Amino acid sequence: MNTKSISVSPFMTNCYIVSCPETDETAIIDAGDEPEKLLNYIDENKLSLKYLINTHAHLDHVAAVVDIQKERSVPFLLHPNEEIVLNGLNQSQQMFGLPNSEAPTIDQYIDKDSQIKLGNLVFKVIETPGHTPGGICLLSGTFLIAGDTLFAGSIGRTDLPGGDTDTLLSSIQNQLMCLDDDVIVYPGHGPSTTIGIERKSNPFINNRYA
């Protein structure tokens, strides 16, 4: 798997461009801003963009989706429970003093029964609500894109509409802490980590997993 992490927007959101090395089929995961930068990388590396996928629909993760779709005819994939978050995009932008922008339209719903194929790669969808109602993580082999569910030494915030701390902790413990120690966690903000490191040292995780 070829992976490029690009930090975008004042929120320093990690946008991931992942591609199959054999076919160059590519997905942009969490296109949070700066669409030109993301598309330039796609074009410079002669990649074939197939999907726009989001782990959740907060404004700092979806702001570039519409502009990319205007340039490239690719579907936008999101969990159905995120539709309520997406519908509140303008309200969230106003809360942060940002100008309103067009909310993307969901082209394909994904959930725990979905498998996303990208050339010879297959991503499993792991439902991890709590940061938002329909938050997901994407797993392929030892590669986990965690969105704002799990960070290095921390977890996603739960004080925004739709967030719930108990639900998020349950998601992490039941869906992520069962993964192997060597699974690399690529979060929505900040540096990467591993499941093993977080199981041992993350202060938010129940110490029965230590």
Image: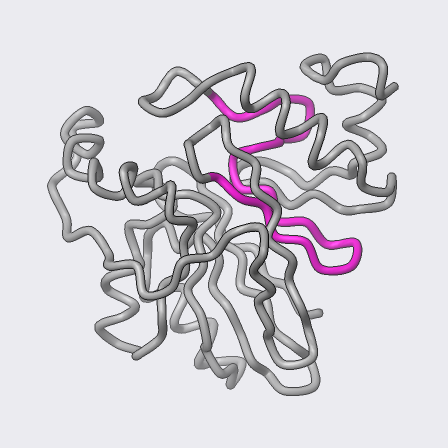
Q: Is residue 64 left or right of residue 147?
A: left
The answer to whether 7 appears left or right of 160 in the picture is: right
Residue lying at 52% horizontally and 82% vertically, measured from the top left: 47
Location of the C terminus (image quadrant): top right
What x and y, as percent, mark residue 45?
A: 53, 80
* Residue at x 82% of width, y 12% of height: 207
Determine whether 182 is above or below 205 in the image: below
Instruction: Pick the residue in front: 177 or 36.
Output: 177
Using the image as rendered, state which of residue 36 and residue 143 is in the foreground: 143
Quarter of image, res 181 = top right
User: What colour scheme has been applied to the protein in the rendered image?
Assistant: one colour
Position of residue 7 measured from the top left corner of the image (x, y, whole percent): 48, 48
Q: Give the range drawn in magenta.
A: 135-157
Residue 155 falls inside the magenta stretch = yes
Which residue is rendered at x = 45% and y = 59% of the image? 53
Residue 142: % across, % down: 79, 54
Q: Quadrant of residue 74?
A: bottom left
Q: Tell me what residue is drawn at x 66 percent, y 29 percent.
A: 172
Expressed as whole percent of the image width and height from the top left, the position of residue 144 reads: 68, 49
Q: Classify the position of the N terminus by image quarter.
A: bottom right
Residue 125 covered by magenta stretch: no
